[in-house]
Image (cartoon, helix red, strand yellow):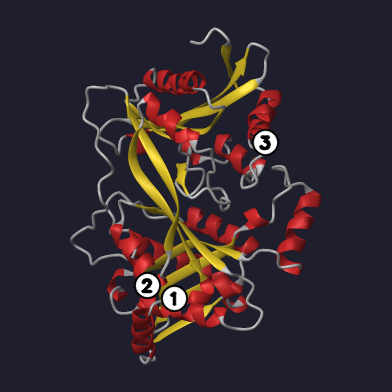
Amino acid sequence: MHPDYQLVEVNSRKLIREFLNFPSRLYKNDKNWIRPLDIEVEKVFDPKQNKMFLTGEAIRWLLVDKSGKTIGRVAAFYEWDSAKKNEQLTGGIGFFECINDQKAANMLFDAGKNWLQKRGVQAMDGPVNFGDRDHFWGCLAEGFHEPVYNMPYNFKYYNELFENYGFKNYFNQYTYRKIIADGASDSTHEKALRLLRNPDYRFENYRKEKEADYGREFIDIYNKAWSQFEGVKPITPEEGNALFRMVKQVMDKRAFYYGYYKDEPIAIFIMIPDINQLIKGFNGKLNLWNKIRLFARLRIFHRCDRLMGLVFGVVPEHQGKGVESAIIYRFEQESYKPGFPFIELQMNWIGDFNPLMMKMVERQVRGKIYKTHITYRYLFDRSKPFKRAEKVSIKRSKPKASR
């Protein structure tokens, strides 16, 4: 413990506000930082909205100096189903923010470690989310550009704070960037054109009359395309429908594609406008006025020129036939039409444990690594050998997936 610093558990509305507001002061001179929406952060810690609380717990702290000024924050959490998937029972810390002070950071890390140890947890990952990996996950290490929606941004010294404490690199997660006008590779075009000669295949973007079918088709494609990865659970109808409702709120039909073979859904490529470009100046608030501003910026003034890759997959029996190339080609043709507003595509959260996906993005989409986030792991038993995340393995009873 540091005699001048004190940990304060976040257990009141006033302290929740301070937990949310502290980063705004920390990053006030950093032009690239964009404050996340408060509602996105708070739903992580709401048992009514976060199913992880069914078999887990979470806690938050602020770190204040002797004058009462906040100098850091952190959350700790565990969920038993997730914890048991690791060699050591593993929980996590996240939403870490801190001044450049190793002693302050160590107090925050110690708080998470001690709390988790008392609950039987044996290791902690950080900085991670108490929920899905595609939100608030990883410590930015390279590529200090504007973050895309709900992805972390931090100062470079954060890597040193984690590593000096003893955290080790468990895996890297890459964000790939592509200038859309550059097009896909020649080999992608060749494969696409070969496949498109077959009239049994068709690829289309969003159609209003099919809206009721897209949620069901999404779940079907996702569960077939990703079920062959070890440890990947099928998405439930509730999860799939929730994701599709989110997509509908911000989607642009020119960035929404399904592929079919004899009218059966076999492929999906969904991108959404990166609304981080639109919520600057909202100060984390999505009140009525900001909702109006967001709608106007997105739908009327078209101020968003960046797409986020949300999901891309092909069912196993149609992989390796050129379907991936064809759906990329279909998007490329749409992007050449007059009035297409998007300049770049960022595909985030591609782990270095998934070389198949990295290869596809690099060779077919022609994306280049733009940002690198690190997921760190800390073993409480310091005598245990540290192991990095294993490469993605495919269930042998099924053909390879595209993700």
Q: Is residue 55 left or right of residue 296?
A: left
The residue singled out by tag 1 in the image is: 328
How many dots with numbers?
A: 3
Q: Which of 154 and 53 is in front in this view?
A: 154
Identify which amino acid the numbered label 2 is placed on.
Gln
Instruction: From the image, state whether disc 1 or disc 3 is nearer to you.
Output: 3
Q: Where is residue 271 in the image (x, y as percent from the top left)?
A: 53, 65
Q: Split into 4 quadrants, where in the image is the C terminus?
A: bottom left
Residue depicted at 38% across the width and 30% down the height: 163
Image position of 313 with respect to 106: above or below: below
- Label 2, residues with CA under 10 Å away: few <14, some 14-19, many ≥20: some
Q: Which of 401 and 140 is in front in this view?
A: 140
Single out the residue that lies furthest toward the right.
289
Q: What element carries label 2?
A: helix
Q: Is mark 1 on a helix, strand or loop?
A: helix
Residue depicted at 44% across the width and 84% down the height: 202
Identify which amino acid the numbered label 1 is placed on.
Ile
Q: Nearer the viewer, residue 115 or 34?
A: 34
Instruction: From the image, state whether disc 1 or disc 2 is nearer to you.
Output: 2
Q: Is residue 139 left or right of residue 246?
A: left
Q: What element carries label 3?
A: helix
Q: Position of residue 273 (x, y in %)?
A: 60, 63
Indicate which disc, 1 or 2, sits on the residue closer to the N terminus: 1
Q: Where is residue 382 in the image (x, y as percent from the top left)?
A: 27, 22
The residue singled out by tag 2 in the image is: 364
Q: Can residue 345 be seen in this view?
A: yes
The residue singled out by tag 3 in the image is: 24
